[in-house]
Amino acid sequence: MLARFALAMSLVGFVLFNYAQYQGWNLFADSANPQALRPGQASRLYHK
């Protein structure tokens, strides 16, 4: 019973999150904005 409820709630959350992304309500907009790079930082960000 509890497993079915947890599965249903996780599916509802997943659907709501995807709907919000589709509508353009980006929850992570502040953290996703790239920062301006200083000249010495570019080489430190790239790793193979």
Image (cartoon, rainbow, N blue to C red):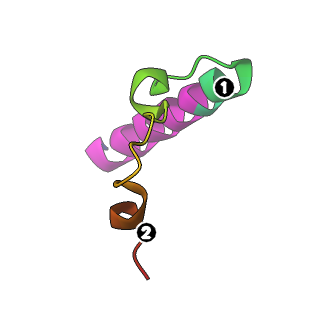
How would you classify the magenta stretch by its main secondary structure? helix
Q: Which of the two labelled residues, at mark 2 and mark 1, occupies the earlier sequence position?
A: 1
- Between residue 31 and residue 40, name the one nearer to us: 40
Outermost residue on the front side: it is 39
Report the Cα–Cα distance between label 2 and label 1.
33 Å
Q: Hey, what amino acid is under mark 1?
A: Tyr
Give the residue drawn at x 43%, y 69%.
46
Residue 20 left/right relative to 27:
right
Crowd class of label 1 (few under 14; some 14 to 19; many from 20; radius 10 Å): few
Q: Is residue 8 above or below residue 39?
A: above
- Between residue 20 and residue 5, name the one nearer to us: 20
Give the residue drawn at x 68%, y 19%.
24
Q: Name the secondary structure under disc 1.
A: helix
Q: Count of labels shown?
A: 2
Residue 16 left/right relative to 5:
right
* Mark linked to residue 6: none
Question: Residue 28: x and y, percent?
Answer: 45, 27
Question: Residue 45: x and y, percent?
Answer: 38, 61
In front: label 2 or label 1? 2
Crowd class of label 2 (few under 14; some 14 to 19; many from 20; radius 10 Å): few
Q: Name the secondary structure under disc 2.
A: loop
* Mark linked to residue 46: 2
Question: Residue 41: x and y, percent?
Answer: 35, 54
Give the residue drawn at x 55%, y 22%.
26
Task: Identify the residue position indicated by label 1 in the image.
Answer: 19
Give the residue drawn at x 63%, y 28%.
21
Outermost residue on the bottom side: it is 48
Question: Where are the magenta residues, as a range?
Answer: 2-17
Q: Hey, what amino acid is under mark 2?
A: Tyr
Query: Is-magenta flag for residue 10?
Result: yes
